[in-house]
Image: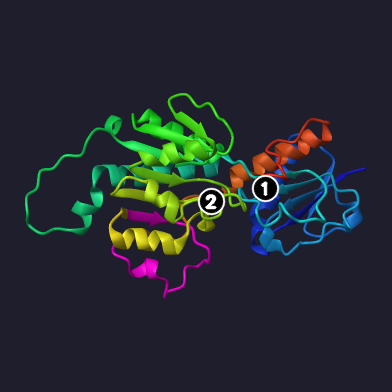
Amino acid sequence: MPVNVLFSARPEQWPVYEPLLTKGLSQADLDFRLATEFEPDQVDYVVYAPTSGLLDFSPYTQLKAVLSLWAGVEKIAGNETLTVPLARMVDHGLMHGMTEWVVGHVLRYHLGMDRYITVQDGVWTPDAPPLASERNVCVLGLGALGEAAATALAALNFKVTGWSRTAKDIPGVTCLHGTDGLRAALSSAEIVVLLLPDTPATENALNADTLALLPKGARIINPGRGPLIDDDALLAALDSGHIAHATLDVFRVEPLPPEHPYWAHANVTVTPHIASETRPTTAAQVICQNIIRGEEGKPFLHLVDRNLGY
């Protein structure tokens, strides 16, 4: 019997992914059928994006796994009709793109580039920045994306502290965890990068209390998830001067409404959710690898812990 793979994502993604998935599965000499429609009880795997509209998995009685095209799984992890393994997207293309974006904005802050790009006032002020080895950077979230970003920053000689909910060990990075670890990580952070998942436990990770832990003049970079930040608390910290600047790529409502105060704030840089994205070429490789592993009886890669939500 062929392996039936249902592609459940936006229609315009089908002509992009279909040849890539076909090529990857064909190379494994796998007897398969790939389509956007099957009878539910005939489906073995679902290649999934929340934008597809598929919400009820209960009719998929032969389903072996749901393979997400998204790194974030907060829109599906709590779905009670989904009882089979759920794998999130860990794509090295997405990882590299995120690392490049994070490193670029950390360097922008570290080198004070905004001062020379946005202000040309004719005043000669030769004020060189410190070396990276003298700059404290904190990465909140040490999953695949956070670890990659922290490792890249450490390779540039930044003093990198990483924080996660559970203990991690990353060469060149001071890894902290737990409530006390979070306080310690923030207390010396001149630049904070948010790469936590979006779960009930991480919502408003940066709030009035945690922002107050940061040194005066700290800068915030959020390419992770919008709900990680209490927007009102951040705006208050920016207005008071406690936080010098924030670069935000993700928001609770997207697109960010034109009337949102972030747009007009002098100390906020808004980017339109461009820090990174899933690259179809590399994402298809990840999907095919998991289908092949499933058919060989091997454990799926990048499984979501449903209790943690990521």
The residue lying furthest to the bottom in this view is: 259
Q: Which residues are magenta?
A: 245-266
**Label 1 belongs to which residue?**
309
- Of 308 and 290, which appears nearest the observer? 308
Q: Which mark is residue 277?
A: 2
Q: Is residue 127 above or below residue 261?
A: above
Element carrying mark 2: loop
- Residue 44 placement (x, y as % from top left): 85, 47
Q: Quadrant of residue 81?
A: bottom right
Q: Looking at numbered disc 2 in the image, what kind of residue is underneath it?
A: Glu
Residue at left 24%, top 49%?
113
- Of 84 and 281, which appears nearest the observer? 84
Residue at left 44%, top 29%?
174
- Residue 39 placement (x, y as % from top left): 89, 59
| Residue 135 counted in the magenta span | no
* Distance of label 1 from label 2 (alpha carbons): 20 Å
For the residues bearing labels 1 and 2, Cβ distance under 8 angstroms: no
- Residue 195 placement (x, y as % from top left): 50, 45
Classify the position of the C terminus by image quarter.
top right
Q: Which mark is residue 155?
A: none
> Looking at the image, can residue 270 be seen?
no
Classify the position of the N terminus by image quarter.
top right
> Looking at the image, can residue 81 be seen?
yes
Q: Looking at numbered disc 1 in the image, what kind of residue is underneath it?
A: Gly
How busy is the neighbourhood of tag 2: few (under 14 within 10 Å), some, or many (20 plus)? some
